Amino acid sequence: MVDNVGNWRWSLFDQFLMLFVLLHIAAKKGPILALVNDVVVWTIGAGHRFSLKSAYEIRTGHSNVAHETVWQAVHKYRGVHE
């Protein structure tokens, strides 16, 4: 989602998000790719909702989630339906 110096690659995701979300993202500096790898931070649960518990379990290594399943859900997402 960012280039190698942390600039957002807007063309990859701007069409999927509402304006107020894009403005929040624009206010943040993106991660520098050389320093950060993409990681899964939530598990596939009821309704595909984020929870602190699932994030904690993943970060502490206490989750047996199949990362491929999560990434498949991310790739299938087509934005908010109006």
Image: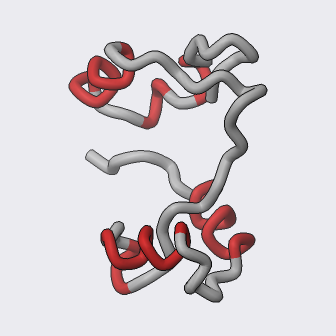
* The residue positioned farthest toward the front in the image shown: 60
Residue drawn 32% across and 69% down? 52
Q: Position of residue 43 (x, y in %)?
A: 50, 75
Q: How many marks?
A: 0
Which quadrant does the C terminus fall into? top left
**How was the colour assigned to the protein in this rendering?**
secondary structure
Residue drawn 48% across and 78% down? 57
Residue placed most toward the observer, 67 or 76? 67
Residue placed most toward the observer, 3 or 12? 3
47 to 14, vertically: above or below: below
* Quarter residue 35 falls in: top right
Q: Position of residue 21 (x, y in %)?
A: 29, 30
Residue drawn 61% across and 16% down? 6
Residue placed most toward the observer, 65 or 14? 65
Which quadrant does the N terminus fall into? top right
29 to 56, vertically: above or below: above
Q: On the picture, is 78 further left or further right than 51?
A: right
Q: On the picture, is 32 further left or further right than 8?
A: right
Residue drawn 40% across and 73% down? 48
Q: Position of residue 22 (x, y in %)?
A: 34, 23
Q: On the picture, is 75 further left or further right than 78?
A: right
* The residue positioned farthest toward the left in the image shown: 20
Q: Position of residue 60 (x, y in %)?
A: 54, 74
* Quarter residue 4 falls in: top right
